[in-house]
Image (cartoon, rainbow, N blue to C red):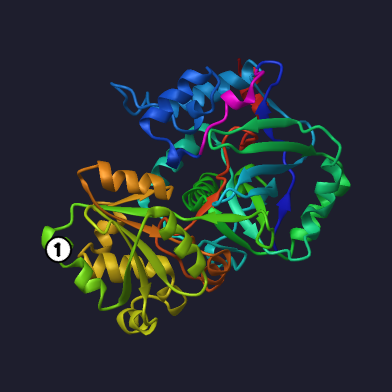
Amino acid sequence: MAEVLGFRGVRFNPAVVDDFDRVICPPYDVIGPELQEELYRRSPYNVVRLEFGKVLPGDDEEENRYTRARRTLIEWLRRKVLIQDREMSVYYTEEDYRGEFGEPLTRRGYYAKVRLEDPDSGLYFPHERTLAGPKADRLQLMEAVRANLSPIFSLYDDPQMVVLRDLEAMAKGVPPLIRVHTDEGVEIRLWRVTEPRLVGEVTRRMADKVFVIADGHHRYETALRYRDLMRERNPDYTGNEPWNYVMMYFSNLSSPGLAVFPTHRAVFGVASDRIETLETQLGEFFEVEPVADAETLSARLRDLRGRAHAFGLVAKGEPRFRLLVLRDDGVMHRMLRGRVPKVVQTLDVTILHSLIFERILGIDRKAQEEQRNLRYVKGTGELVRQVVEDPEVQLGFVMNPTRVEEVKEVALAGERMPQKSTYFFPKQVTGLVMHLLFDPAEVVSAG
């Protein structure tokens, strides 16, 4: 039985911060060096200082990005840059954005805290593989700040839309507590729900749900590891301590505002003889059709969604664009039988990585995981630019997005997709609300 509860969120104090756009940041895993510098410049209170601080010359075990994040968090609490809400709350959000093809969409969801459950609980289902490096980084940060700075993004299935019904009704005609605009053109509105009846209804209606993790796999596994460490350090724990819970953002699988965008692949560092024989080898498995331009290629791929396994190939020479359509699904079953679960075998991402990358181009699984020959790219236009302008990039592969139904099917079967199989848009920003795993009165009074 799932336990989804309200919590006393920590937010930026509007009496100190008058422009919330300048203090939010994207998730840590999409922050590159240039964006990190820009976020530092935007505001002395940008939450990147907590979420993904700079590495500085001379850093050591006592002085580093994690210890600086702890000091900054404590300082902001003492100076009331950050304030904690008094009531147990659920935080309802609406996000207006443009879909993959420019159509206006609104995704509705909410923040709450959820009891952490072990992988065999049957209550939560990851759908992507994780790597040790990001988990070690997030654990160091969690041990330093003792807080959930950003949420796990989870999906639940509610075809009748009953969970959000009262929250949406509550927000109508009421100004949001926070309104922000992201660099990606998303407007986010947040309302704090404090009425015990409404918070209790969320808990009751979510009790029989299971959750599919859409984004934040590393953070969820890190939260579990932190919980287990705290239990070892506190053998008399009751199970109700704050570190037994994690902050989550919940979105409905059945919502028309839920979108998955594609993540394309740029290929580099492959042996030249593999590139020279690529089209011949592709012809053994795919119908290969030259296409006039990127717009036509994208339109053809869109038409084939859910009907065929298809990819776009972007090459250096002419014809630059080709449409690849798999002739026979059976090749994947024959090639991967015993190696890859059946539910995963004919996903587009599996076909691309196993048949094209591994078998034809010779990029083995370890090289794929370490991204030695692959670069993940958002947007067809950016992929084409890299193929044309970057001498290192040899090929580009345009993908259709993984369908929400496929994510659900794989996760509920207890299996996992390769990394970067899904790109749920918009990603959840950091800095709207945070969940402390300690009593801030301890550090405030100590100051």
**Left or right: 126, with 155 as reference point:** left
Location of the N terminus (image quadrant): bottom right
Secondary structure of the residue carrying tag 1 is helix
Residue at left offset 76%, top offset 31%: 177
* Magenta highlight range: 17-26
Q: Position of residue 389 (x, y in %)?
A: 26, 41
**Left or right: 289, with 106 as reference point:** left
Identify which residue, 401 or 39, lies in the foreground. Answer: 401
Of all residues shown, which one is farthest toward the front? 292
Q: Give the quarter of the image for residue 124.
A: bottom right
Q: Position of residue 161 (x, y in %)?
A: 77, 60
Residue 18, magenta (yes or no): yes
Residue at left offset 78%, top offset 65%: 160
Within 10 Å of disc 1 (Cα), the crowding (few <14, some 14-19, many 20+) is: few
Q: Give the quarter of the image for residue 313.
A: bottom left
Identify which residue, 314 or 358, lies in the foreground. Answer: 314
What residue is disc 1 on? 276
Residue 225, magenta (yes or no): no
Location of the C terminus (image quadrant): top right
**Left or right: 151, with 157 as reference point:** left
Q: Position of residue 130 (x, y in %)?
A: 41, 55
Amino acid type of the residue that numbered disc 1 sits on in the rendered structure: Glu
